[in-house]
Amino acid sequence: MNVLDKILKKLGIRLADPGEFTRRSLMNDKLDLLQTEGLADLINSETEKQRSMAISGLSGKLSKFVNEINMKLRLMLANTEALIDFSDEDLPKNILNKILEQNKNIIKTIKKEISSSEISKPIRDGFVVSLIGKPNTGKSSFINYISKKEVSIVTNIPGTTTDAGKSTIDIDGYKFTFIDTAGLRKHKNKIEEIGIKKTKEIILRSNLSLVFLENKEMNKYDEIKNRFFVRSKLDKKRVIRNEKNIINISSVTGEGVEGLLKKIKQKLIKNKKNEPIFSRERHLNIIQMVLCELKSIKTKDSLDIIAFKLREALRISLEINQKFDIEDVLDIIFKDFCIGK
């Protein structure tokens, strides 16, 4: 038993569990579930965009949006129930038309936010960029240069890279993971065969591939659709700088590297005017189910059917910020917290 254990035992206290303080805040209504998830995301953020998205959730922006949607759904449901229960009463005219119009407006609002949140997953998980090409074309030198450290071994011996080296960097607040591969070529032994197999697997899960060229063997990579052709070693040989469809760089002097990174960002990130509201897949899955229910409401539906679909949409929507009966969700959230936070 160490000194700390003895002190705790003597005083009759214990260390807080991971996330315990925040969990108590949640249970005592000091924070809601969406703010709690935002705090977890803020703690685990690596880039400025991740931090910005987490702060948005922590500030209550998503909670406000969801509460407004729920309030509108409640009002629509109440009006529909009134039409059913008090059909003989003197109710205002065109209530049903107004309900259907409100439904269209909510659908439009949700669609807009879902579209704005398409960037959420890439912000959270980052983008994967694979480096492929023949041996000794500058792949390892490039990844070492952008990493500012030796991630991959660089020699003039072909096939040095038999396993994938990774480097994660921040480009203007976005997370990019570059993976140095064994390249694509005819293998001479079992080890090279394993490396090439891994390369093909990495290409399949990459958002973009940088194909490092030796000469002009571009036609050999026709099966790779999302790609940039790169020629390295600009410092060692004369090249045609405006060579069509080829980006020239030097991983020794750094010439052309910033331009390449800028092109990568422009290729993968579409400009979004608004910050994404839905930051987690859980949020998006739920709101998409709500959207599905609302879109299923038709003019020809009976009032009972409309009420049922509205009630179901509201029930699903409430799950986004529902803190009770979701112990599994809470355990997932708090497992990434630091002790006591």
Image (cartoon, rainbow, N blue to C red):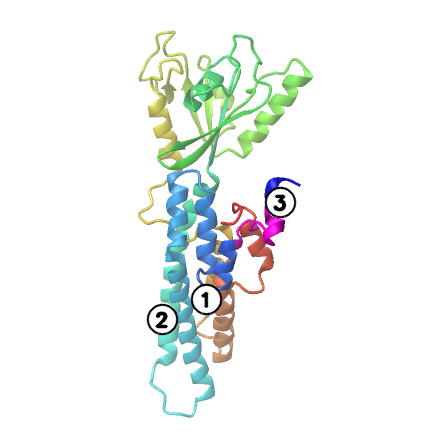
User: On the image, numbered disc 1 is attached to which residue?
Assistant: 294
Answer with mark 1 or mark 2, whichever residue precedes in sequence.
2
What's the residue at 37%, 27% (across, down)? 261
- Most extreme residue toward the right is 190
The answer to whether marks 1 and 2 mark residues whose Cβ atoms lie closer than 8 Å is no
- Residue 335 locus on image (x, y percent): 57, 48
235 is higher (above) or lower (below) than 171: above
Magenta residues? 7-20
Residue nearest the viewer, comparing 83 with 48:
48
Name the disc covering residue 101, or none: 2
Residue 5 tag number: 3
- Label 3: which secondary element: helix
* Residue type, mark 1 in image: Leu
In the foreground, 239 or 170? 170
Q: How many marks?
A: 3
Horizontally, is 253 left or right of 129 in the view?
left
Q: Pick whichever, 133 or 119, lies toward us.
A: 119
Inter-mark Cα distance, 3 to 1: 56 Å
User: Is residue 317 placed above or below 281 in the rendered structure?
Assistant: below
Residue 162: x %, y % from top left: 60, 19
